[in-house]
Image (cartoon, rainbow, N blue to C red):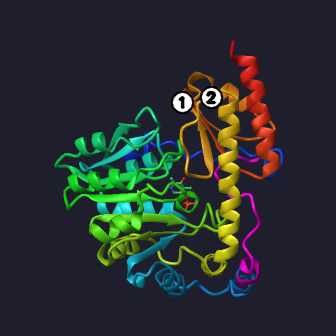
Amino acid sequence: MSAPRARKALDGIPLYRAGKAALTEEHKLSSNENPYAPLPGVMERAAAELGRMNRYPDAGMTTLYDALAKRLGLSPDHFAAGTGSVAVLFSLLNAHLEDGDEIVHAWRSFEAYPIAIDLTGATAVRVPLRPDAGHDLDAMADAITERTKVVLVCTPNNPTGPVVTAAELRSFLARVPDHVMVVIDEAYVEFVRDPAAAKGLDALADHDNVVVLRTFSKAYGLAGLRVGYAIARPEVAESIRKATPPFTVTDVAQAAAVASLDAQDALDERVELIVQERIAMVAALRAQGWHVPETEANFVWLPLDEDAISFSAACDPVSVRPFAGEGVRISVGTPAVNAQLIELAGSWRTRNTA
Ligand SMILES: *Cc1c(COP(=O)(O)O)cnc(C)c1O
């Protein structure tokens, strides 16, 4: 018997596992989603596009690129959008990696990275996080060989929370050869308050080999509509656009993204609410005796090791994200559910610490 056979590269690739469903959507603290309704004006402008669903979307994404260009002070040819920044990363890696190449990234980091990397046939070189759960950029620079084509830097790091500082990134970039691409994944950049944190756009201004990834899924609350983008010098942006199938981002999603950019004040307010809840959650958990790494994102990390799975079960009806043998990531939700989670975490500690 013979049958169609997928590429060997797929054999070791796990299916991406999304965060567990919860009692109510509000109880879902497992996928770093925004707990709030769309920003003002977004529903209306998306609905207007929905009525044109017989038409293909604008493949050139001109309105979206123009809006981003205006917001960030760069020309539109610096952008490449896709159905979420994960999809943009897939296109980027497909455009730049092949069998035999190496890509360096921190681990534990975003669980979509291994999938995106393995599909290209390139070899992942994983560099363990520091004890404080941040990137070990010195070790990552040491891991670069003549085969390295790409380095991924996730700041703030999902799922652990710390940022890379501007000083750390500067010395790292000084050690990276010009032909090696450095992808800075800023999915959570809007939640960052640490003034020492690295800024991807500053790095891009100084280094042609830097690519910044951003998304409308987290702070902007458009996870279900799928819009993310890369910011890069035009030749690199073009390579990503070429490697992306046409008509991926719908006009509904493009309109929602542009309307969200127009609602900057409401966005700032909402993000500030989430940041204040994060600060309160970290303080409450530390007061219970938990070791919580610094976090600049909309989630906190509990390094529970072997207790990750049993802790996450004990959080029911709140859904959190366990990483077996490593820890548990808890997204910041609404104040009521955050309070419920903090209480559950407190009783778990009382039961499980002598
Ligand atoms: C959520 C997330 C993304 C973006 O996801 P999309 O919904 O595909 O835009 C990218 N990187 C990291 C580290 C994330 O956590």
- Image mark count: 2
- Is residue 90 found inside the magenta-colored segment of the image? no
- Of residues 109 and 339, the one drawn nearer to the viewer in this rendering: 339
Q: Position of residue 92 (x, y in %)?
A: 38, 64
Residue shown at 65% from the left, 33% from the top: 286
Kind of residue indicated by mark 2: Ala
Q: Which residue does the numbered mark 1 point to in the structure image?
A: 326
Q: Kindly identify the residue that appears in the image at 41 percent across and 37 percent down.
A: 129
Point out the tag, 2 or 1, that comes first from the N-terminus: 2
Pointer 2 with pointer 1, Cβ within 8 A: yes
Q: In the displayed structure, would residue 70 be above or below residue 347?
A: below
| Residue found at x 32% / y 45% | 137
Assess disc 1: are there few (<14), some (14-19) or many (≥20) residues with their C-alpha within 10 Å of its C-alpha: some
Q: Give the magenta range.
A: 28-45
Residue marked by disc 2: 308
Provide the major secondary structure of the magenta segment.
loop
The quarter of the image holding the N terminus is top left
At label 1, the amino acid type is Glu
Q: Secondary structure at mark 2?
A: helix
Residue 3 visible to an observer of this rendering: no
